[in-house]
Amino acid sequence: MSVTTANRIINSALRQPEKERARIAETLIASLDAAPTPEVERAWQEEIDGRLREIDSGVIECTPWEQVRDRLYRNAHVRR
């Protein structure tokens, strides 16, 4: 694909409504990801299962999303 064609596609995408631009971006990013191998899928499942066991057993205490969001918001607005 030539640079001119790529620029034409990008410019066209940028003129779309926000929701459509997000859909386009999501599709393009997803197209870059290689399909996970069975080994990777198995490793992720083991990690998820282990974390769920920790939560269920009380080893890990979860923080409610509202608290995390508020902390992130405060930290993002701190002048540095």
Image (cartoon, helix red, strand yellow):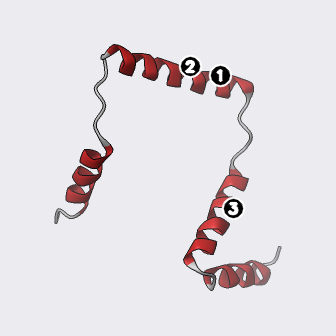
Question: In the image, residue 59 lies at what x, y percent?
Answer: 30, 16
Q: CA distance from mark 2 to mark 3?
A: 29 Å
Q: Nearer the viewer, residue 44 or 62?
A: 62
Question: What residue is rendered at 59% in x and 24% in y?
Answer: 45
Quadrant of the drawing holding the C terminus: bottom left
| Residue position for label 3 | 28
Tally of numbered discs: 3
Question: In the image, residue 41 lies at what x, y percent?
Answer: 66, 28
Three-letter code for the amino acid on which mark 2 is drawn:
Glu
Q: Residues within 10 Å of mark 2 (few under 14, many from 20)?
A: few
Give the SS element for disc 2: helix
* Residue found farthest to the left: 79
Q: CA distance from mark 2 to mark 1?
A: 6 Å
Q: Nearer the viewer, residue 3 or 28?
A: 28
Question: In the image, residue 60 lies at what x, y percent?
Answer: 31, 22
Question: What residue is rendered at 73% in x and 25% in y?
Answer: 38
Three-letter code for the amino acid on which mark 3 is drawn:
Leu
Residue 5 position by quadrant: bottom right
Question: Which of marks 1 and 3 precedes in the sequence?
Answer: 3
* Residue found farthest to the top: 57
Q: Is residue 19 above or below residue 61?
A: below
Question: Which of marks 3 and 2 precedes in the sequence?
Answer: 3
- Check whether the beta carbons of the residues at disc 2 and disc 1 lie within 8 A of each other: yes
Three-letter code for the amino acid on which mark 1 is drawn:
Arg
Q: Nearer the viewer, residue 12 or 62?
A: 62
| Residue position for label 2 | 46
In the picture, measured across the screen, residue 30 lies left or right of residue 55, that is right
Question: What residue is rendered at 83% in x and 73% in y?
Answer: 1
| Residue position for label 1 | 42
Q: CA distance from mark 3 to mark 1?
A: 26 Å
Q: Residues within 10 Å of mark 1 (few under 14, many from 20)?
A: few
